[in-house]
Amino acid sequence: MKKVAGLFCLMAAVFIQGQAVPARAAEEYHVIKKIVLGGKGGWDYMKDDSAQHRLFISRWTHVMVLDTRTLKVIGDIPNTLGVHGIALAPKLNRGFISDGGANQVTIFNLKTLKVTATVKTTGEGPDCIVYDPVTERVFTFNGRSDNSTAIDAATGKVVGTIALGGRPEYAAADGEGHIYNNLESTSEELEIDARTLAILHRWPLAPGEHPSGLSMDQKHRVLFSGCHNQKLVIMNANNGHVITTEPIGPGVDATRFDPEAELAFSSNGGSGTLTIVKEDSPTKFHVVEQLPTELGARTMALDPATHRVYLVTAKFGALEPPRPGEHFRRRTIMPGTFTLIVVGP
């Protein structure tokens, strides 16, 4: 793999499978393995539970749960029609699933994986779902009604609705009581007060267009928005200033940030690549690698303890018509070909 001059190995140690080893430089990231998980249906977001060594994968009507140490399926959460995302509230021992086809949230026990309740959302097509630990609230971003539903994570009660003014995509919590959300239809970034449910700011993402994935460097207050015009827009979360953009591949649907390695990732399903961006400082960034993965690998999860990235894809057939509000066409999925891709240093 091509080396990038001037990039030094990271000195921080990470704990991987019981052994402390030094985290490696970004240019040494590679595909570690591919595992066919099989099954029918599509997928969307994934969620890593680093503390419990688990990976949650949405599969349209159910959620698969993997042990990240063995990469074996250890559980399944059924009856989640149109599932998009998973949010976790470890302190409350609760998980939350956005059931986009049923306009509801499924609540489950984190230890047993058993469903404990369902909650109807105040909008249609709940897609992204995020947990705010400051207010202990869960927010669904409802793609067919351009609003967000706020739910008390402890009681499961709806506490309010936020009119967003555009079609929402992914969201991120800053750990200080604010939620950031990409508006795909207007190419804007929203800052939401999780306490009052007020929209504090509405910032343009130009030159980014039709944003999808969103992640955050909470320490340095930097947002990473993956946009469908093949730009990673890097924004100051305090004032909405676009710091810079970096090139990514087509078909992005997720970004992630590794705070220890100070690396941002963009999964680009249209090109089958994983863009890796180094944060040299809070105002300086550069692409260190465009790692080949597989076509269709558009969503991902990141384990900050092992620095591993998990992606999923499958083999595809004919093109399907575009879904409402989407800017790309999907292909039919070949049954039994659903595959997990593990990337790491």
Image (cartoon, rainbow, N blue to C red):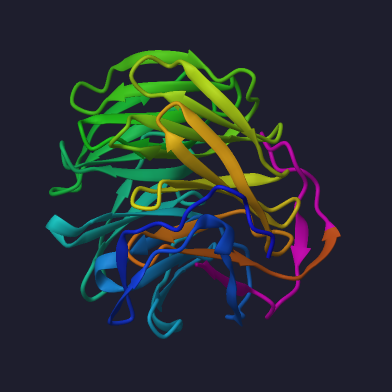
Q: Residue furthest front?
A: 6
Q: Is residue 117 above or below residue 315?
A: above
* Foreground pick, 152 / 88: 88
Tell me what residue is drawn at x 49 percent, y 58 percent: 25
- Side (left or right) of 17 relative to 125: left
Position in image of residue 278 (x %, y %): 50, 43
The picture quadrant where one finds residue 43 is bottom right
Which quarter of the picture shows residue 325? top right
Question: At x 16% / y 42%, what residue is drawn?
Answer: 136
Whether the magenta-drawn stretch holds residue 326 is answered as yes
Magenta span: 319-345
Residue 336 within the magenta-colored segment of the rendering:
yes
Q: Residue at x 16, y 38 (%)?
A: 134
Tally of marks: 0
Residue 23, percent across and down? 39, 64
Residue that protrudes farthest toward the right in the picture: 318
Q: Nearer the viewer, residue 64 or 26?
A: 26
Locate residue 35: give its quadrant. bottom right
